[in-house]
Amino acid sequence: MRFGWKILFKLPLVLIAIGVMGGAVMLLWNWVVPALFFGAHSLDFLHAVGLLALCRILFGGFHGRGGWRGRHRWHALSRDERERFRERFHERFDERFGKEEKR
């Protein structure tokens, strides 16, 4: 039953966040773009939400996880595995970018 409460709690927050971000995109677009580009049209709210979704798809923002996604794999490696990974990484990329010295 805890799963149901989580959804009931998060769904309104997500809808509010979409509304606020869509409104912000709409206001910024209507303030900046028509003044900069001749012939540019204003956006209504639904087009602003669509533009926000398109940017999310193209640029992959709003992850909410923060930072490097492979971090959990790095922490799962033993010290020896980490050292082997570092050595292989430096062997592979130091040659490619002209670094001769070994770390």
Image (cartoon, rainbow, N blue to C red):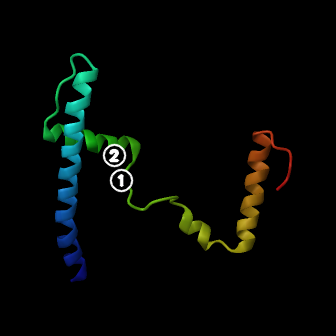
Of residue 23 and residue 3, the one placed in the foreground of this image is 23
| Corner quadrant of residue 45 | top left
Left or right: 65, with 48 as reference point:
right
User: Would you identify the image quadrant in which residue 79 lies?
Assistant: bottom right
Cα separation between marks 2 and 1: 7 Å
At horizontal 24% and vertical 16% (from top left) the residue drawn is 38
- The picture places residue 58, in percent across and down from the top left corner, at 37, 41
Q: Secondary structure at mark 2?
A: helix
- Depth order, front residue of 91/32: 32
For label 2, the residue is: 56
From the top left corner, tell me how far across and down residue 42 is, in percent. Answer: 16, 29
Amino acid at dot 1: Phe
Asked whether the beta carbons under mark 2 and mark 1 sit within 8 Å of each other, the answer is: yes
| Residue position for label 1 | 62
- Residue at x-position 18% and y-position 45%: 23
Q: Which comes sooner in the sequence, label 2 or label 1?
A: 2
Residue 51 point in image, percent of width and height: 25, 38
Front residue of 68 and 38: 38
Q: Is residue 68 left or right of residue 12?
A: right
Question: What residue is rendered at 20% in x and 51% in y?
Answer: 20
To which quarter of the image does residue 65 belong? bottom left
Q: Is residue 81 above or below residue 16?
A: below
Q: Secondary structure at mark 1?
A: loop
Q: Is residue 72 above or below residue 38?
A: below
Q: Residues within 10 Å of mark 1 (few under 14, many from 20)?
A: few
**Residue at far right of view:** 101
Quadrant the N terminus occupies:
bottom left
In the image, 82: left or right of 24?
Answer: right
> In which quadrant is the C terminus drawn?
bottom right
User: Which mark is on residue 48?
Assistant: none
Q: Amino acid at mark 2?
A: Arg
The crowd level at tag 2 (other Cα within 10 Å; few <14, some 14-19, many 20+) is: few
